[in-house]
Amino acid sequence: MCTAHFLIGAVAIVDDGAGRILVARHTYRRGAPWALPGGWVQRGENPAHTVVREIREETSLETEIMSLLTILVESPGHLTAVYRARVAGGTFRPSDEVSAVRFIAPGDWPDGLREDHRRLIAALATRPTPLA
């Protein structure tokens, strides 16, 4: 029996309460440096915990996951979990991976925002958060 191996990513649509979404300027992306915050899931890690950990490591912001919005099949071996989250504390500090963050209104796209993340924000930012 063969077990499939997957890359699993996790990103968050972090809403500021006024409908604006957090995006981060990544230092290692030249053509499209702006993107939703998140990262790769480590072996055995819950993808929701990945988002919280990555945002803390890259921005010093503390976040709280509100809900899972969707799972994207990026390719046969790559899945991405997309969560709704909110900032629960902390103050932004640049890191080796993220030089800036800002909240944007859907449609008010910064130059260099990843096209796939633009589509995610447009499609999911206004979707209601399900009741727990």
Image (spheres, rainbow, N blue to C red):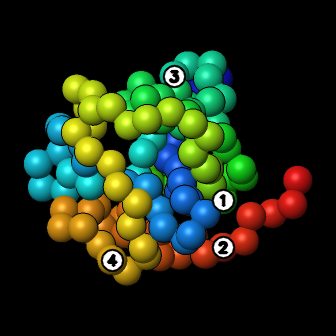
Q: Secondary structure at mark 3?
A: loop
Task: Compare marks 2 and 4 and give the one earlier in the sequence.
Answer: 4
Task: Answer with left or right where residue 21 lies relative to residue 126.
Answer: left
Nearest to viewer (mark 4 / mark 3): 4
Which label sits on residue 69?
Answer: 1
Disc 3 marks a residue whose amino acid type is: Gln
- Residues 117 and 90: in front is 90
Residue at the spot of label 4: 108
Q: Is residue 16 left or right of residue 96?
A: right
Q: Report the residue that reaches farthest toward the right.
A: 132
Disc 1 to disc 3: CB gap under 8 Å = no
State the image quarter where residue 107 is shown.
bottom left
* Residue 46 lies in quadrant: top right
Residue, x 61% and y 23% (percent of image)? Answer: 45
Residue 94 lies, with reference to residue 111, above or below; the image says: above
Q: Amino acid at mark 1?
A: Leu
Looking at marks 2 and 1 on the same chain, the residue that comes earlier in the sequence is marked by: 1
Determine whether label 2 and label 1 are within 8 Å by CB: yes
Q: Amino acid at mark 4?
A: Asp
Which residue is disc 2 drawn over?
Answer: 127
Q: Nearer the viewer, mark 2 or mark 4?
A: 4
Give the mark nearest the N terminus, 4 or 3. 3
Q: Which mark is residue 7?
A: none
Instruction: Determine the CA span between mark 1 and mark 3.
Output: 20 Å
Image point 27% across, 37% down: which residue? 98
Could you give the CA–CA distance between mark 2 and mark 1, rounded to whole angstroms? Answer: 8 Å
> Dot 2: few (<14), some (14–19), or many (≥20) neighbours within 10 Å?
few
Q: State which mark lies toward you, 4 or 1.
A: 4
Query: In the rendered image, which residue does mark 3 sit on?
Result: 42
Neighbour tally class for label 4: few under 14, some 14-19, many 20 plus, Cα within 10 Å: few
Kind of residue sitting beneath label 2: Arg
Disc 3 crowd, CA 10 A, few/some/many (<14, 14-19, 20+): few
